[in-house]
Image (cartoon, coloured by chain):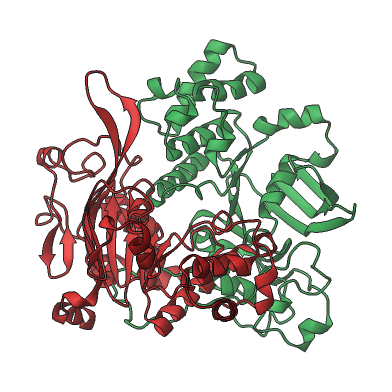
Amino acid sequence: MGALLQVESLNVGLRNGAGVVVPVIENLSFEVHSGRTTALVGESGCGKSMTALAIMRLLPEDFVITGGRIVLEGEDILSLSPKRMRALRGNGMSMIFQEPMTALNPLFTVGDQIAEVLRWHQGLSASAAHAQAVEFLRAVQIPALEQRVNAYPHQLSGGMRQRVMIAMALAGRPKLLIADEPTTALDVTVQAQIFDLLAKLQQDTGTAVLLITHDLGAVAELADDVLVLYAGRCIESGASADLVGHPRHPYTRGLLGCVPHLKLGQRMPAVWSDLGEIAGMVPPLGARGADCAFLARCRDASDVCRSRPQPMLEPIETDHAVSCWRKSEIAA
Amino acid sequence: MTALQTVQSSDDSDFLLDVNDLVVHFETGKRRPFQGPSYVHAVDGVSFRVRRGTTFGIVGESGSGKSTTAQAIMRLVPVTSGQIVFHGRNILDLAGKPLREVRKQLQIVFQDPFSALNPRRRAGDQIREPLDLLNIGSRGERDERVRRLLGEVGLPPQAADLFPHQFSGGQRQRLCIARALAPEPDLIVCDEAVSALDVAIQAQILNLLKRLQRERGLTYIFISHDLSVIQQFCDEIAVMYLGKIVEQAPTAGIFVEPRHPYTWSLIAAAAPPGPIRDELKRRYLVKGDPPSPVDPAPGCRFAQRCPSATENCRIVLPQLDAIRPHHYVACHRVGELDPPAFDAAAMGNPVQQSM
């Protein structure tokens, strides 16, 4: 079976004040399959949210898609009419945003906001849509739903609001769900509940999920496939267990090394040992040349890296590709 | 074990800060019919002591009162009652000049370096500001100290002439740290100081804070919601829930033998992926959201969400009692409930498996 979503060498640029288009995302290609979760991982500014917005065709003003194809079920999204695109958003794909407070309309009850999706996309009557909205709230495990369906967003806690967002995103029964850092704004115990809920709903509906996160530790558990982005370029991709277990790219290795891991049942050494850190920072937009984007911060950089442009993303084994000149020397 | 013994042998003079039954209530502005005003019980009777040269961690979810505790220590919010003894003096009685003198030794680093810096002032001036306000050194000395501070936090001297928007998030947090260091304080409160930063930058800032602590003998109060950062960074940890400390112990005590059901839930949510985490989540992760801190019900604050709560828990508020030296727990059922087993024998060997 073919992929549900295919992104082929997507290029996105930002038109700056002088009218010059600065690349934001370069040559990004990946696929998302039904019932599976693909994660885009990277630091802020690496282009992961822009990728999501490009797929939804919701890029902010001044951002332009300069090349590539985005194909959802055989339909090239980039050539669709605004009307067809509107129909697709909600039915074909939908999105959960990071901040549920700003993504919900404060002037309508949550029931009305979920019902709106159903009335638009499934042509239900107001009362039928309202009844269905209650069912969706039940599916996202909101307690006391008879009252909650008539509540306004400000009357709900952060976790409840994110559940409402998920209910809204699922109301159109989308084939692709894009979750942009769905738990970043939430407390840790609530985060765990939301991830469990997403996993369960995916199992029930077979939706494909594109998960956007900065937490490389969490993807091992949540995603089937992972792409690591750096400065708008994909530098490593593969099956999540393999990639997290045996990262090859120096950046991926650095990213995993700088996160402290909780150690249970063990005493910590009394002396502090420095966390692994990646010196320097991500090159800003416009300062990204043809060189490997990670060159300036890379500890393993050699003359090969300095003399050649950004390497291609090449497979190193089945289901694991790396963009690094020294990929075969840097052992797993 | 050595840490425990040194704590036991220490006397009072080793404690830099002593917070005693701190209470911070805010009036909500809403009045219930026929009753008095409602209060947000942001901090509700919190006591702890911080040893000189160590890091005291406060962990909890949003609304647990950890930031309000920090702000009360800095005298940035009005305190309802209690004592904050710093350098042997209750700083809650101070005002005006004596309070300024105390602030030389007491500084804070905030969560969001974007809003903690004035966008219209140059970085150097902002680091100089505490020196100017607190009248430290002559003009020439202050400029010299600003240059030195920039170097210490890993920024070039030219950075002094730039504006905040010309720095990245990590660099801005370095500026905030330099500003906090400027009056050479003894105690720095880090209120979620690394939470807004990317993981790679977060590691840089944590390493920087630790190096400064080593070099200058600083004492930190480190507030975070991230258990793994807290475990790495802190010597002693207090777990807060709805304005109360529910468990307090040296770091090893919290992560080897936690005793409060809320601590179990936090650990279950933060455990590294693997079979151990699944098992912990199944057994200990609580459902729902924390209840509102407005006029909380009597009894244990955690009783609504606690899987082990009894009728007694809902009526009687448990006290924070020592279960062994330096390990305090506020739970009626601490004697009956067994702490979770983290050892490999009980549930496979998850740490190795997950890596």
Q: Nearer the viewer, residue B173 or A247?
A: B173
Q: Is residue A76 visible?
A: no
Residue B169, quarter of picture? bottom right
Residue B155 seen by the camera:
yes
Colour for chain A in the figure: green
In the rendered image, the quadrant that contains the N terminus of chain B is bottom left
Tell me what residue is drawn at x 11 percent, y 50 percent: B332
Estimate the x, y position of residue A124 in percent, counting from the top left. Answer: 60, 15
Frontmost residue, A70 versus B179: B179
Specify whether A226 is left or right of A50. Answer: left
* Position of residue A135 measured from the top left corner of the image (x, y, whole percent): 46, 24
Q: Spot the residue most to the right.
A: A19
**Residue projecting furthest to the bottom:** A303
Instruction: Give percent across and percent down for residue B65.
Output: 33, 49
- Residue occupying the point 56% across, 32% down: A104
Q: Is residue A115 left or right of residue A309?
A: left
For the image shown, how many numbered marks are present on the structure? 0
Q: Is residue B9 above or below residue B339?
A: below
Q: Nearer the viewer, residue B113 or A253?
A: B113
Measured as percent of width and height from the top left, residue A325 is found at: 74, 79
Q: Is residue A274 left or right of residue B63?
A: right
Q: Which chain is red?
A: B
Q: Nearer the viewer, residue B342 or B86?
A: B86
